[in-house]
Image (spheres, rainbow, N blue to C red):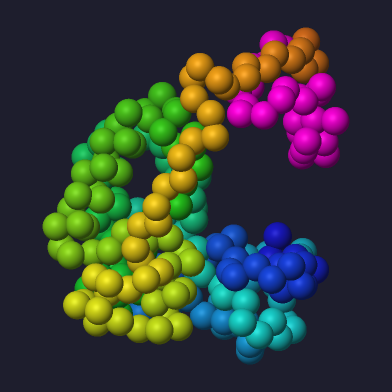
Amino acid sequence: MFTENMFKVLYTSKFIYDLSWPIDATFDGRDPMYPYTLDYLSTEPCPTQEQPCPKLSYPGLWEVPNINIMNKDNTTCASMMDGCDPLGNATAWYDRLVNNFHYRYDTNRAPFGMHMHVTFFLSALGSDHMVAAKKFLKYAEDLGVWILTPSQVIAWMKDPQNVEQAKSFAPWQCPDRPKPRCDSSTVNSCHYTVKGVQVYMNTCTKCPPHYPTPTNPDGN
């Protein structure tokens, strides 16, 4: 992670951005970081010395700062929400989200990323986490905040729009959703035994002979 080789691969593969570089920032009076390109050497602190962060130039490759979540006492936990202490009810997690959001909203309005894995909602307190996330999104929406993807944020930074212009900004419009390739009556249900475990997978195409894996993605 965060190594020169990783960024070389991202650059040569024409990725638009990276969002894997965590920043252990705190409420220290400095403005939060906006996304930036790696045309020049990054000023982000490197999280590890064993695998030094990139020092070469990667023109046009964007870095979206993955700022660690801050606790109520201004200490930090992790850049992914599920990496923080999972304890706490919906109110505690809602307050944490609002606190981190206002760190941006009340300063330079740098984007606030809600970064979590699916385990955040599948844990023992998953229902509380979902309640907190939905309540926070409604809170932000009522303030007139746009809920965007990283690529949409980058599109705005390349071509800034005011509030009225943003309403018709093409990269921020919802694309037409394509029709499903199949439905419940035509989907293929595939069954496999993987290391003694029964695994099921639905697909709109023919079931591959083997269960797909990262080293055998098409199952052949």
Name the foreground residue: 129 vs 185. 185
Q: Residue at x 27, y 72 (%)?
A: 168
Left or right: residue 72 versus residue 16 is left
Q: Quadrant of the N terminus?
A: bottom right
The correct choice, above or below, for 184 with respect to 52 in the image is above
Residue drawn at 20 percent across, 57 percent down: 141
Look at 62% across and 77% down and name the residue there.
61
Q: Is residue 47 left or right of residue 67?
A: right
Q: Report the magenta stretch's main SS.
A: loop
- In the image, which residues are magenta? 197-220
Is residue 5 toward the left or the right of residue 123 in the image? Answer: right
Which of the 4 quarters of the picture holds residue 100? bottom left
Give coordinates of residue 72: x percent, y percent: 29, 54
Asked whether residue 49 is in view, the answer is no
Taking depth in this image into account, of 4 and 201 the one nearest to the observer is 201
Total tally of numbered discs in the picture: 0
Q: x, y (%) of residue 206? A: 71, 25
Q: Which of the two residues, 91 or 34, is positioned nearer the viewer here?
A: 34
Query: Residue 9's image quarter?
Result: bottom right
Residue that lies at the very extreme toward the right in this rendered image: 220
Most extreme residue toward the left is 142
Tell me: 180 left or right of 133: right
| Viewer-closest of 195 and 204 | 204
Residue 25 against residue 131 in the figure, above or below: below
Who's the residue at 49% across and 56% down the image?
A: 79
Give the quadrant of the C terminus. top right
Examine the structure image and report whether residue 217 is included in the region drawn in magenta.
Answer: yes
Give x and y (percent) for residue 47.
Answer: 62, 65
Q: Is any atom of residue 79 visible in this view?
A: yes
Q: Is residue 29 magenta?
A: no
